[in-house]
Structure formats: C-alpha cells, structure tokens
Image (cartoon, rainbow, N blue to C red):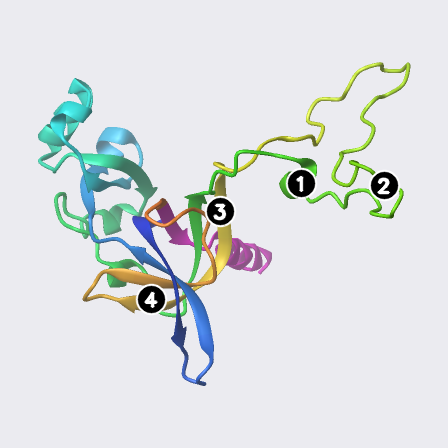
Amino acid sequence: MKGLIGKKVGMTQVFNDEGNAVPVTVIDITSCEVVGHRTPEKDKYSAIILGFKEAKEKHLTKAQAGNFKKAGAKAKRIVREFRVDAAELANFKIGEPVKADALFKKGELVDVTGITKGRGYQGVVKRWGFRGFGQTHGTHEYRKHPGAIGQRKTPGRVYPNKKLPGHYGVEQVTTQNLTVVDVLSDKNLLLIKGGVAGHNEGLVVVKPAIKPQMRAAHKSGKK
C-alpha cells in the first residue's frame, strides 16, 4: 500500500481534452521525504516511513531526534508509515524526496484523507442535516430545534449517541475514488478531481483507492 503526505494548496480548475472545465484540488508534496524503512528481517514486515515539513530539534523529543539521527535523515514534523513490498523497498532511499510521478499516474483513482474544517458549536440542522420544524406564521423560535428527546417512563433516559447540537468539524475524513487529473512532476504537484477535506495549507494523505483493489481481489478469488 504505497502513499504520500502532502499539503492542500487550494482548488482551481483545468480544461480536459474535450474542453470542459474540471474542478481540481492542488496537493503539494515538495517537502515529503523518506526518513526510514521497515524491513522483514528486523520488523517482520516491509514499509517506508515518510516525513513532511522540516522540524527544529528543540520541538522533538530526545527519542524522536535520535531516530532521525540514527537513520541519517532530516528531522520532520509529520511522520507516516506506508506498507510496500519488500522488493519495492529498495527503490525508496532514506533522505531522498518522494516524486509524485513515481507513485501516481494520470487517470489513477486515489483515496485522500484530511482533517475537516472546524465549525465550532452547531445545531442539529447544520451538524446532522435535520429538516427542521415547519416554518408557518404560527411557528415562533422553533424552526431549528431538534425536537423531543425524552423516552417517557421506560427507559427514562436519553440513549447514547443521540444526534444533538455540539462541536462540528475537526474530524478525519477520507474521500474515496478521486481521479488524478494530472501530475506536475516539475513542481511536484498532484491535481485531483473534486474537493478534499480540510482547509488550505492543511495536511493530507494520498493513497491508491482501496475499493478497486478489493473488487479485483474478490473477482480473482471467485475464479
């Protein structure tokens, strides 16, 4: 399972071969580098460790600083691990930057994970999409209320996980099956069709779409 760490730059649009405007999210992976390996001999599995954004040593614990120093890599603020085959591991050398065109191609489907924007304390209409109360001339101050939540005598309490007003946003969300519209290898940018969770300059993780892989594995298993 290959992948990379990037920064959401923002949204724009490009024109495809048919002349239609396609909305895309621009993801910058310029500062994404390989900072470590996981090998079958030592760790019982193979994976690459990627780092993103340079970090000052004073912002790291002694253990973190020691790990970077031992691996011979630059200190990074964000560290993520991605599974790869043992044969592929040799292609990713510690300290080298990750190239967008080496991992993803134009037209490939990807899953993008990000942290949604924080929207503070919100009511049930915005937070959960409730329809709200009928807004007739006789309705006063009840248009966006959640309605009754009591359970009468039995069980005499509100069930856990009831959809009520509360903090909305700042959640990890994965948008699946997005198409890579283009890969700008000279600028190390990915153009991905559609919107991605998070604000501009926010951290995102891009992986190959899991559902097509599962369908292919399921079909091969049937045969």
For disc 3, the marked residue is 174
Q: Position of residue 61 (x, y in %)?
A: 19, 20
Sequence-wise first label, 1 or 3: 1
Circle nearer the viewer, 2 or 1: 2
Residue at mark 4 to residue at mark 1: CA–CA distance: 37 Å
* Residue type, label 1: Trp
User: Dots 1 and 3: beta carbons under 8 Å?
Assistant: no
For disc 2, the marked residue is 139
Q: Position of residue 44 (x, y in %)?
A: 30, 32
Viewed as shown, does residue 136 lie left or right of 194? right
For disc 1, the marked residue is 128
Magenta extent:
204-223
User: Dots 4 and 1: beta carbons under 8 Å?
Assistant: no
Q: Residues within 10 Å of mark 2 (few under 14, many from 20)?
A: few
* Residue type, label 4: Lys
For disc 4, the marked residue is 105
Circle nearer the viewer, 1 or 3: 1
Circle nearer the viewer, 4 or 3: 3
